């Protein structure tokens, strides 16, 4: 069996779970500047308070998993992306503590709102920049990163950072549509609409720009007939976008978030297709990066049993906290 | 001195700083999670409302500390790669899967049930809520299991071989996980976490008893904490001694540094105080008891005790740091034993809550568990130097190819952010602790379940 490939898929699932779940709770913070009323912000935060730290655990699994099964990729990517990684970690600190601190003080509440917004912005932006940096490729000599200190910083990576910020805002807005009611929900519908349109524009730009500048990606997507199957991705993406906009228009509360997740899944698959089979683009393939089979098998045995359990009890938590968030509830009494 | 501030030094300092901050929170949350499970269990069994009051009091403190633990922990899971990439590449196949198991068996369990524990009281039944609390507590302990296995493997590697690209690969997973120092280190750390929290709880109880000795909730807290001190502190001394003997067997140079023994000698002295001098290989200004180290380490006054002169100089750890950290840890441990015995004596006299001196002493002991935990980690980690994987990979050969400016920048950012953010968190925790546990109100959950609403009152109008 090709354990390296199985693990590449599992790590991709973990990273996608992170993006799908932490995406909406980062997005909620990113929407804060447009929701100025304190009561609205309380409700927004309470829609994610019981689940945010489970959501961030997927990021730990992404990092820990990469170290475990693709140690070479981990040890090249982290130094290569040193600054955005550190910035992301610091951003996550500022936003993570705000969940508790914000309700511990009245006078300094504004400070922790700001900490929540800025921290989330830095984290989301850094994640987008890392994504962009992987797409543009990472220079390696031997088993070490050999590129420059600022290779990750280009107009393209910044654009990717902005795109991820907008994407998370879309997820946040559609999540709020599902979890809130009244004025807050009406405003979320509007936010959902604008962010979806901006996001589609971003995805379209990246999809056209990359093949234009990068022959490898052009070949991957435009080789007849091998690439024809891949064309399902942009077509499905268009379908999802229309579905999302239509469900927003028709005020179907529960649907927009699911359509939004669909869009993310397709864009994410597009990213995977564009870098496959590399884990460190154009330098190290997933097979070259893999730990010995013995390590891959040892962890796989556990993952096969534990991941379904994790999905089950995480699902249970979401089920316990299903439905609209009551503006008057919360445990911070 | 300044030439030693190279990129390697800064990377080590950054790791030491971020992990020293991080360890405070798990040490605290491991203990508090178990305490909460005990409180909720006792409430369900006895229906004594004071247990429910204490649960609600401590669960909010727990929530703040847990949040800080999560965010400072995410930093750790990426820092192996950002700053120790050579180590990650070489040791990843061994330690990576153990950390993977930590995430899969512990972190998800804690995080998954934390939401129900904090916010779900009016959404699930009380038995289910208790189950969630138990899962959080179990999760914290499982997490300690895996991460201490990783650390212990770096101290006493076993069950490995090398492959042709220079990576450590596993020949026997059981030997890796249950490597020689692991059982001792795990027991020592778990007890340390429980003791740390016992003294924090004791100090909070003592603070409120000093204001009003009839405070029932504070009495309960203080009494529970002092039972822990009486039983667990002496147990910890015993476990610590076993751990020391294990270290003597596998890392004799570390024990030599802990004891300040530069020379191998029979009737080795126990240094109570002194300034170990790495250059001259002598302990300056020594205050020593002749022969006592031979008795403690070998249980025989004439036995020869190995000194650092048995090892090449380039393999010596920084002696003074290890020597002093060890004395601080042991000193705090002795004070903990003293507190336990003293409280036992006062309890026998029926004056546990009346003796102001004991209450004041307990108040001062409040933060001492953290001091001992950090000192203990300095002993074991600095004592492992100059190796990152003992005897196999030098710390100097394990760092990332990041230049000095980069590490300096991130280090400064970490220092500023940690003091700011975790300083604020500590302030909020202390303010919670200043609140009177007796005044914690218990909402009527059955009623709230029907209306799905609860009051929102800010903790402090400030």
Image (cartoon, coloured by chain):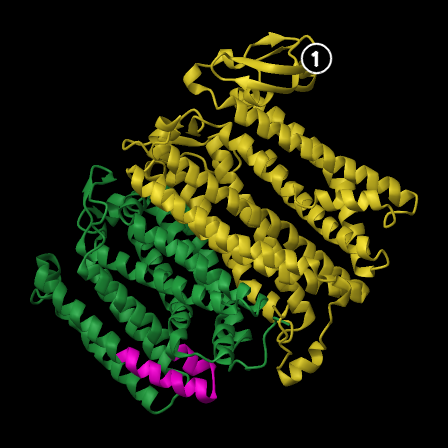
Chain colours: A green, B yellow
Residue A291 visible to an observer of this rendering: no
Residue A326, how many percent across, how many down? 55, 82
Q: In which quarter of the image is residue A222?
A: bottom left
Q: Quadrant of residue B95?
A: top left
Location of residue B129 with respect to A10 vertically, above or below: below
Q: Does the magenta stretch include residue B48?
A: no
Q: Dot 1 corresponds to which residue?
A: B300
Give the residue at x 46% y 30%.
B157
| Mark 1: few/some/many CA within 10 Å (<14, 14-19, 20+) | some
Residue B294, how many percent across, how many down? 66, 14
Q: In which quarter of the image is residue B343?
A: top right
Choose between A193 and B112: the one closer to the eye: A193
**B434 with respect to B170 (left or right):** right
Prevailing secondary structure class for the magenta stretch in the rendered image: helix
Give the residue at x 39% y 30%.
B395
**B200 with respect to A213 (left or right):** right
Which residue ends up furthest to the bottom in the rendered image?
A: A250
Where are the magenta residues, as a range?
A: A174-196
* Tally of numbered tags: 1
Choose between A75 and B50: the one closer to the eye: B50
**A137 with respect to B135 (left or right):** left
Give the residue at x 43% y 67%.
A114
**B315 with respect to A249 (left or right):** right
Give the quarter of the figure containing the N terminus of chain B.
Answer: top left
């Amino acid at each position: 069996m090709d354990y390296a490939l199985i693990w590449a898929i599992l790590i991709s699932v973990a990273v996608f779970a992170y993006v799908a779940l932490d995406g909406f709770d980062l997005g909620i913070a990113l929407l804060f500047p447009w929701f100025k009323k304190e009561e609205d912000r309380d409700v927004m935060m309470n829609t994610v308070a019981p689940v945010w730290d489970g959501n961030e655990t997927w990021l730990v699994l992404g990092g820990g998993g990469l170290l475990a099964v693709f140690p070479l990729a981990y040890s090249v990517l982290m130094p290569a992306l040193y600054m955005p990684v550190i910035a992301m970690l610091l951003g996550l600190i500022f936003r993570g503590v705000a969940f508790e601190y914000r309700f511990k003080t009245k006078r300094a509440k504004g400070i922790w709102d700001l900490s929540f917004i800025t921290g989330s912005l830095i984290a989301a932006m850094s994640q987008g920049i890392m994504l962009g940096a992987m797409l543009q490729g990472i220079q390696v000599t031997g088993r070490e990163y050999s590129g420059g200190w600022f290779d990750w910083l280009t107009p393209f990576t910044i654009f990717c950072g902005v795109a991820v910020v907008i994407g998370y805002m879309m997820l946040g807005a559609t999540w709020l549509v599902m979890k809130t009611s009244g004025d807050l929900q009406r405003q979320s519908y509007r936010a959902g609409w604008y962010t979806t349109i901006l996001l589609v524009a971003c995805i379209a730009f990246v999809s056209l720009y990359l093949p234009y500048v990068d022959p490898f990606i052009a070949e991957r997507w435009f080789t007849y007939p091998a690439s024809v199957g891949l064309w399902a991705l942009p077509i499905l993406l268009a379908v999802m976008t229309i579905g999302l906009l239509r469900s927003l228009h028709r005020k179907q509360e529960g649907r927009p978030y699911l359509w939004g997740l669909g869009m993310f899944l397709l864009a994410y698959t597009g990213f995977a297709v564009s870098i496959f089979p590399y884990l460190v683009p154009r330098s190290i393939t997933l097979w070259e990066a893999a730990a010995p089979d013995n390590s891959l098998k040892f962890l796989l045995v556990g993952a096969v049993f534990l991941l379904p359990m994790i999905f089950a009890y995480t699902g249970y938590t979401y089920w316990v906290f299903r439905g609209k968030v009551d503006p008057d509830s919360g445990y911070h009494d | 001195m300044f030439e030693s501030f190279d990129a390697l030094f800064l990377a080590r300092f950054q790791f030491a700083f971020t992990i020293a901050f991080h360890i405070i929170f798990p040490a605290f949350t491991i203990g508090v999670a178990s305490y909460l499970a005990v409180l909720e269990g006792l409430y369900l069994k006895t229906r004594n409302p004071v247990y429910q009051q204490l649960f609600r009091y401590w669960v909010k403190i727990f929530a703040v500390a847990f949040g800080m633990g999560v965010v400072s922990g995410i930093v750790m899971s990426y820092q192996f790669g950002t700053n120790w990439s050579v180590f990650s590449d070489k040791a990843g196949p061994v330690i990576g899967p153990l950390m993977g198991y930590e995430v899969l068996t512990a972190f998800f369990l804690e995080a998954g049930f934390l939401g129900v524990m904090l916010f779900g009281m009016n959404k699930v039944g009380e038995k289910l809520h208790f189950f969630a609390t138990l899962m959080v507590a179990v999760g914290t302990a499982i997490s300690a299991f895996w991460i201490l296995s990783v650390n212990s493997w770096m101290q006493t590697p076993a069950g490995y071989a090398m492959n042709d690209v220079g990576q450590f690969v596993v020949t026997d997973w059981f030997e890796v996980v249950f490597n020689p120092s692991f059982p001792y280190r795990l027991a020592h750390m778990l007890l340390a976490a429980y003791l740390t929290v016992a003294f924090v709880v004791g100090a909070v109880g003592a603070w409120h008893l000093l204001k009003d000795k009839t405070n029932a909730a504070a009495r309960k807290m203080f009494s529970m904490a002092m039972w822990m001190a009486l039983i667990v502190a002496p147990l910890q001394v015993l476990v610590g001694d076993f751990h020391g003997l294990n270290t003597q067997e596998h890392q004799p140079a570390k024990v030599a540094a802990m004891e300040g023994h530069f020379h191998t000698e029979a009737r080795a002295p126990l240094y109570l105080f002194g300034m170990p001098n790495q250059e001259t290989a002598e302990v300056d200004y020594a205050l020593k008891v002749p022969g006592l180290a031979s008795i403690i380490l070998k249980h025989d006054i004439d036995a020869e005790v190995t000194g650092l002169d048995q090892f090449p100089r380039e393999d010596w750890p920084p002696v003074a740091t290890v020597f002093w950290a060890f004395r601080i840890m042991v000193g705090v441990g002795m004070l903990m034993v003293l507190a336990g015995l003293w409280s036992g004596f006062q309890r026998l006299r029926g004056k546990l809550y009346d003796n102001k001196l004991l209450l004041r002493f307990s108040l001062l002991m409040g933060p001492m568990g953290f001091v001992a935990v950090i000192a203990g980690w300095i002993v074991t980690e600095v004592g492992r130097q100059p190796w990152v994987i003992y005897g196999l990979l030098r710390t100097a050969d394990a760092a990332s190819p990041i230049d000095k400016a980069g590490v300096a920048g991130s280090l400064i950012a970490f220092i500023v952010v940690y003091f700011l953010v975790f300083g604020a968190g500590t302030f909020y925790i202390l303010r919670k602790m200043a609140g009177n546990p007796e005044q914690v109100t218990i909402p009527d959950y059955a009623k709230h379940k029907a209306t799905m609403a609860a009051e929102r009152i800010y903790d402090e109008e400030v």
